[in-house]
Image (spheres, rainbow, N blue to C red):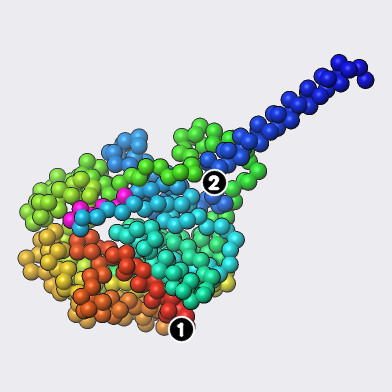
Amino acid sequence: MPARSLKAGRLWFFYLLLTLLLLGFQEALFRFVFPVPEIANFNRINYSMMVNAQGGEDSPEEKVRPLSNEAYIWASDPDGVEFVHRLNLYGFRDHDWPVSASQRVMFVGDSFVEGFMATDDQTIPRGFESASIAADSQLKTVNLGIGASGFADYLAVIRDAVPIFHPDLVVLVLYANDFPVPQSLGGILESGQAVLKSNRYLPRLYGVVSSLSRGERVATRWLKPPFMYLPNAESVRSPLHDPALLEYAKGFVSPEILLSMQQGRFNPFVINEQQKYERHLRRPANFYGIIGQVKSYVEAYGGQLLVIYIPYKGQVSDAYLAFTSQFDSSPEPLSLTAPTYQVHASLLREECQRAGVPLLDMTSVLRQREAGGERVYWNYDEHMKGQSYLLIGEEIFAFWQQL
C-alpha cells in the first residue's frame, strides 16, 4: 500500500474516532444535565392541576405543565414561616425512585402526606423510614402526597403507581376533609393506562430538542427557582379575585391576615374554615365499598393496605379557636372536640373492619400531645408542624409492626 494512502486511511480513522468520542462525550453530558424519569407517563400533574406561576389566567407563564425537578414555596405569614418543596422528576416531594426495588412502602394522601408547613425531611414517610432504620429494617418509602387532592386523586395515584413500583405496603392517609366519599369513584381503579417507559436508547439531544420544539420545558439536573404555590389576588385562581368576596372578607378577616392572603402569603381558602368544618364534620359518610376495592387492587400486585385517619386541628383541641376566629365570620365559634364531630372516624373504622383493613386513628395520640402542652398544628395554617408529621410516621411504623 502506498505511504500516502496509508497516511490518509489513518487520518480518516483518527477523525472517525474523534467524532465518536465527541458524540459520546456530548451524550454523556446531556444525560447528566437533562435527566429523564424511568416512566414517561407518570407525573404529579396528572392528578393535581397545579399552575406553575402567578400571572393571570391568560398569562403565557401560567399554564399547566408537568412538574419535574422543580420547587415551590408554601407560605404562612401569620405563622411567620415559609417552606420550599423540592420535587423529583415525577413532580413529587421526594428523591427519585428506581422502578425496581425491594421492601418499599408507598404513602398516598393530600398535603398532610406531602408535608405542607414542614421541611423536606419532616414528612410522614420520613418519620416512618427513620423508625424503620432504628429498628434495623431496610424499608424505603415513596411519598406520593399531593396538596389539594382528594379521594378520586388517591385512587388514580394508587391505580397508576402500584403497577409501576410494586410496594409491599400502601399507606392511605385520609384527612378530615376527605369525607363524604363521592359515589362516582367506582370505576377509577379500572381505568388506568399502560405504563410507558422512557426510551433509554433515544439520544438525549434529540429528546431535548423535540421537547423544546413542542413548547415543553425540559427538566435539568438542578432545581429551578421556586414558584409560589398560593395565588395572589390578581390571579383568577384566588377566591379574593372576586371583588364581592373580597369586600365580604374585609368585614371580619383581620386586616393583616387579609393582606397576606391577597399577596399569596397565606391560604385564602381558609376563610370561614371553622364554620365549614362545623357543618362538614356532622355529615354522614358512605364509603360505597371503596376501601375494600382498594385493598383488592393492592393485594393483586402483592401488597398490603393500611389506612390512617388524621383529624382537623379543631377536633383535637380548642386552643386553635382563638386563631381561626380571626378569619371566621362566626361571633362565637363552636368547639369541634365533642363526639358529634368525630362521626367520620367512627364510620371509617366500621368500613375498614368490613373490608378487613387495619386502621390507625391518630386523634387520641394527637390529643394526648396537646393535653401535655405541645401544639401539634400551626396556629393559623391548617397543617401540622414538622415534628408532628414525624411522630405520625413513627406511630404508623409501630402500628404496622404490631400487625
Q: Camera-side residue: 75 or 340?
A: 75
Q: Which mark is residue 53?
A: none
- Give coordinates of residue 41: x percent, y percent: 52, 50
Residue 27 occupies quadrant: top right
**Bounds of the magenta segment:** 73-78
Q: Tell me if 290 is positioned left or right of 254 in this view.
A: right
SS under mark 1: helix
Q: Tell me if 360 is positioned left or right of 364 in this view.
A: right
Task: Kindly check if marks 1 and 2 are in contact, taking CB atoms under 8 A apart as contact.
Answer: no
SS under mark 2: loop
**Label 2: which residue?**
36
- Give coordinates of residue 105: x percent, y percent: 49, 68
Residue at 81% x, 24% y: name it.
10
Residue at 9% x, 64% y: name it.
330
Q: Is residue 75 magenta?
A: yes
For the stretch drawn in magenta, what is the main secondary structure? Answer: strand
Q: Which mark is residue 402?
A: 1
Which three-letter amino acid code belongs to the residue tagged 2? Val
